[in-house]
């Protein structure tokens, strides 16, 4: 997948719940894409951020994620976590999550249409891991 394929496209990716202990008296719960927890850990410390899996998905626009994170946390923080490359590294991470989210749909569609070929389905699932 190249960056031209991503232009103006919304994608569904899994969402996680991050419990952030800001201080001794303040704990917040936020629902964010998994890669955003890296920023939270950088800001509040690894020991103060606990992450839980969720069944929910969130909609993102990949080419706007870097700008969204910069607006939310500041360019310096985002660059410190993902590098000074104007979002290239972040885009690679986002593409990885998008590909991960597509595999179950593809294999589910194949299961329904190709029930006589279970080996192809197993191979597809093995690539995901």
Image (cartoon, rainbow, N blue to C red):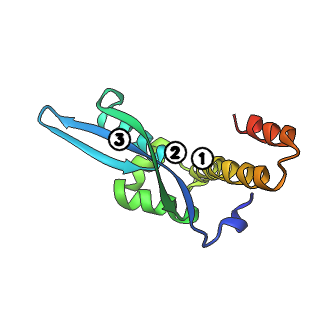
In the picture, residue 26 is in which quadrant?
top left
In the picture, residue 63 is in which quadrant?
bottom right
Lower position in the chain sequence, tag 3 or tag 2: 3
CB contact under 8 Å: marks 3 and 1:
no
In the rendered image, the vertical position of residue 29 relative to residue 1, given as above or below:
above
Seen at 71% across and 68% down, the residue is 4
Q: Nearer the viewer, mark 1 or mark 2?
A: 1
Q: Position of residue 43 (x, y in %)?
A: 33, 40
Q: Residue furthest left?
A: 25
Alpha carbon separation for disc pair 3 and 2 = 19 Å
CB contact under 8 Å: marks 1 and 2:
yes
Seen at 32% across and 26% down, the residue is 47
Task: For mark 3, give the secondary structure.
Answer: strand
Q: Position of residue 126 (x, y in %)?
A: 76, 34
Q: Which residue is mark 3?
A: 18
Alpha carbon separation for disc pair 3 and 1 = 18 Å
Q: Residue furthest front?
A: 116
């Amino acid at each position: 997948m190249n960056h031209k394929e991503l232009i103006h496209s919304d994608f569904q990716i899994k969402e996680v719940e991050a419990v952030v202990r800001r201080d001794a008296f303040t704990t917040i719960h936020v629902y964010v894409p998994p890669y955003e927890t890296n920023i939270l850990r950088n800001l509040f410390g690894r020991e103060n951020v606990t992450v839980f899996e969720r069944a929910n998905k969130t909609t993102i626009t990949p080419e706007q994620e870097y700008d969204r994170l910069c607006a939310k946390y500041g360019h310096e923080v985002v660059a410190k976590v993902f590098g000074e490359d104007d979002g290239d590294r972040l885009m690679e991470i986002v593409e990885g999550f998008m590909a991960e989210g597509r595999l179950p749909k593809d294999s589910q569609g194949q299961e329904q249409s190709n029930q006589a070929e279970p080996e192809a389905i197993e191979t597809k699932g093995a690539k995901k891991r």
